[in-house]
Image (cartoon, helix red, strand yellow):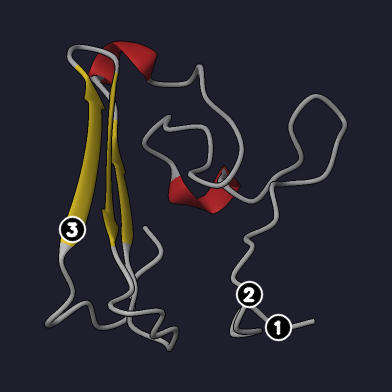
Amino acid sequence: MLSLDPTGFPRTVVEVPGVVKVELTTPVEGLRRKGHRAIITVPATYAGKLNGLCGDFDGDSADDESPCSGGPPADCFVDDGSCGA
């Protein structure tokens, strides 16, 4: 989970029941600062079948940053530069 401090921001929720739920805090009036959150929820039936920003969801956080299928792990994009260079 990418998480800073979401206090005071409204949420946008997109859900496909039984498949995926994505909750994002929403910038207010174009305000972009540290403090937004993305929560991605998937059913346990997807365990070990995912890769990318959330790891592979196999219950072992130690391997979540391993490359998938020989490629690099997913990069986070935040246009305020808080993810680093």
Amino acid identity at mark 2: Asp
Residue 43, position as x, y percentages in the image: 24, 20
The structure residue drawn at horizontal position 29% and vertical position 11%, both measured from the top left corner, is: 45
* Residue at figure coordinates x 51%, y 16% from the top left: 49
Figure disc tally: 3
Mark 1 / mark 3, whichever is N-terminal? 3
Q: Secondary structure at mark 3?
A: strand
Q: Earlier in the sequence, mark 2 or mark 1?
A: 2
- Kind of residue at disc 1: Gly
* In the image: residue 50, left or right of residue 44: right
Under mark 3, the amino acid is: Arg
Quadrant in the rendering for residue 71: top right
Q: Nearer the viewer, mark 2 or mark 1?
A: 2
Q: Which residue is mark 3?
A: 11
The residue tagged with tag 2: helix, strand or loop?
Answer: loop
- Tell me if mark 2 has few (under 14), some (14-19) or many (20+) residues whose alpha carbon lies within 10 angstroms of its own: few
Q: Position of residue 8 (x, y in %)?
A: 12, 82
